[in-house]
C-alpha cells in the first residue's frame, strides 16, 4: 500500500532559516516499510565528500524543533545532516499514529544511516548520529548495534526504559509500583479495544498547576510557548498513545553499551533534572570496558535539561564539532 504523506514545503521551524546552508525535504524507508520524512541540510559551499549526521529528538518532538536546530547548525559547520521524524509521528508514515517502541526507534536511526551512506556526496566512513533527550538514549542504544556509526553525540539524555520502569528519579522502583502500572496499561488496552481508538496520554500539561516541579515548568516554557511550540509535536499537543509505553516497561536499554568501540560523547546540563541518567549511562558505558579512550562526559555549567534543546549559548557546538571531526577521521 502506498504511503499517503502530507509534506509541508513551507519553512515552519521554530528556529530561523540559515543562509549558509541548502535545505530540502527528503524521504526514505526503514526496514519495517515505514516512510520517514526528514529535513536535509548541507553547506552551500564545499568540495569533496562530506561527513554526515542523522539527528533526532527530543522524545515526542518533531524535526521542526530541537533536532532541526542541531542539524542546521552542524551543516553550517561542514556536515551534511538530516533531522527526521520518527515512525508514527510528524510527517513520517506509520499507523496507528503516536505509537512508539524501541525496536522502531533504533531502526529509524539505522534507516537514516542507510540513507546517508547512499548519497554520492557523503563519505560513508564518516557517519555520526546525534540524539536529544529521550532520543539521546536511543542514539546510545543504536550505537550498541550499528558499527557504521563512527561517533555518537548524546545530548541532555533520558533513559526512557528507566523512566517507564522506575518513574522519575527512581521514586517508583518497586515491584508493587510496576505491577500497578502494568495493571493500568492493560486496563487501557481493554478500553482502547472497546472504543476502537487509542487514548492519548496528553502532552506537556497546560495550564501549569501552581505546584508544578521546575522541570515541568521548563518543558512548558519550551513546548507550550512560541519558543518551541509546533502543531505536529506530540509534546506540544495530545502526546503519545497511552498504551505505547507498554514495551518500554518490558525492556532495559544499554545492556551492551560497554562494548561500543566507536566514539561517544554524553552531554548534560549541571542543573538538569535528568543529569543522573546521563551520569549513570556514562558509568555503565565505561564499566569493565576496553574502549574508554574515545568516550566523554561533558557537564555544562548552569544549564537545565531544556537549555540544551535550543539555547545556542549553552549547547557546546564547538566541542561537538571537534569531537566529531576528531573521531570521524
Image (cartoon, rainbow, N blue to C red):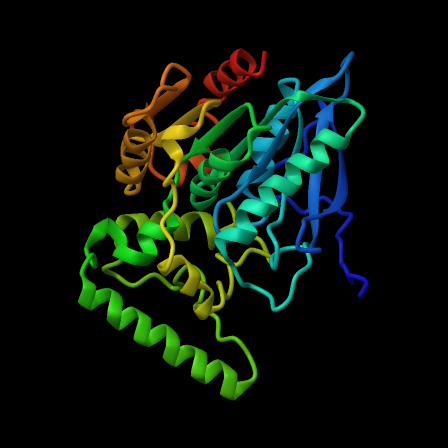
Q: Is residue 103 left or right of residue 213?
A: right
In front of the other: 176 or 66 = 176
Q: Quadrant of the C terminus?
A: top right
Residue reaching furthest bottom? Answer: 194
- Name which quarter of the figure residue 286 lies in: top left
Residue 208 lies, with reference to residue 179, above or below; the image says above
Q: Is residue 242 left or right of residue 38?
A: left
- The residue lying at 48 percent from left, 71 percent from top is 200
Residue 120 lies, with reference to residue 136, above or below; the image says above
Q: Whole-percent x and y of residue 187?
A: 37, 80
- The residue lying at 53 percent from left, 63 percent from top is 99
Q: Whole-percent x and y of residue 213?
A: 25, 53
In front of the other: 8 or 32 = 32
- The residue lying at 35 percent from left, 23 percent from top is 298
Q: Is residue 31 left or right of residue 6?
A: left
Residue 285 lies, with reference to residue 220, above or below; the image says above
Q: Whole-percent x and y of residue 27?
A: 75, 46
- The residue lying at 40 percent from left, 29 percent from top is 259
Amino acid at each position: 500500500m502506498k504511503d499517503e504523506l502530507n509534506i509541508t514545503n513551507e519553512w515552519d521551524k521554530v528556529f530561523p532559516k540559515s543562509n549558509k546552508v541548502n535545505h530540502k525535504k527528503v524521504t526514505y524507508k526503514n526496514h519495517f516499510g515505514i516512510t520517514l520524512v526528514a529535513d536535509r541540510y548541507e553547506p552551500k559551499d564545499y568540495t569533496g565528500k562530506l561527513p554526515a549526521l542523522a539527528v533526532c529528538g527530543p522524545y515526542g518532538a518533531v524535526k521542526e524543533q530541537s533536532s532541526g536546530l542541531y542539524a542546521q547548525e552542524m551543516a553550517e559547520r561542514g556536515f551534511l545532516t538530516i533531522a527526521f521524524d520518527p515512525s508514527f509521528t510528524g510527517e513520517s508514515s506509520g499507523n496507528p499514529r503516536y505509537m512508539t517502541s524501541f525496536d522502531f526507534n533504533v531502526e529509524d536511526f539505522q534507516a537514516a544511516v542507510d540513507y546517508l551512506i547512499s548519497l554520492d556526496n557523503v563519505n560513508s566512513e564518516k557517519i555520526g548520529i546525534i540524539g536529544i533527550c529521550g532520543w539521546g538514549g536511543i542514539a546510545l542504544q543504536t550505537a550498541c548495534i550499528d558499527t557504521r556509526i563512527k561517533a555518537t553525540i548524546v545530548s541532555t539524555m533520558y533513559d526512557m526504559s528507566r523512566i517507564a520502569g522506575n518513574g522519575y528519579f527512581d521514586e517508583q522502583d518497586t515491584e508493587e509500583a510496576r505491577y500497578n502500572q502494568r495493571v493500568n496499561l492493560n486496563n487501557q488496552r481493554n478500553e482502547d479495544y472497546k472504543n476502537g481508538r487509542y487514548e492519548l496520554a496528553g502532552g506537556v500539561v497546560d495550564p501549569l498547576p501552581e505546584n508544578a516541579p521546575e522541570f515541568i515548568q521548563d518543558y512548558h516554557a519550551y513546548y507550550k510557548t512560541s519558543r518551541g511550540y509546533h502543531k505536529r509535536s506530540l509534546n506540544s499537543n495530545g502526546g503519545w498513545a497511552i498504551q505505547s509505553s507498554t514495551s518500554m516497561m518490558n525492556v532495559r536499554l544499554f545492556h551492551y553499551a560497554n562494548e561500543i568501540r566507536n566514539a561517544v560523547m554524553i552531554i548534560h546540563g549541571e542543573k538538569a533534572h535528568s543529569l543522573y541518567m546521563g551520569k549513570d549511562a556514562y558509568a555503565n558505558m565505561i564499566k569493565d570496558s576496553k574502549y574508554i579512550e574515545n568516550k566523554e562526559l561533558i557537564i555544562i555549567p548552569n544549564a537545565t535539561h531544556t537549555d540544551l534543546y535550543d539555547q545556542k549559548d549553552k549547547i557546546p557546538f564547538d566541542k561537538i564539532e571537534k569531537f566529531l571531526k576528531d573521531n570521524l577521521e
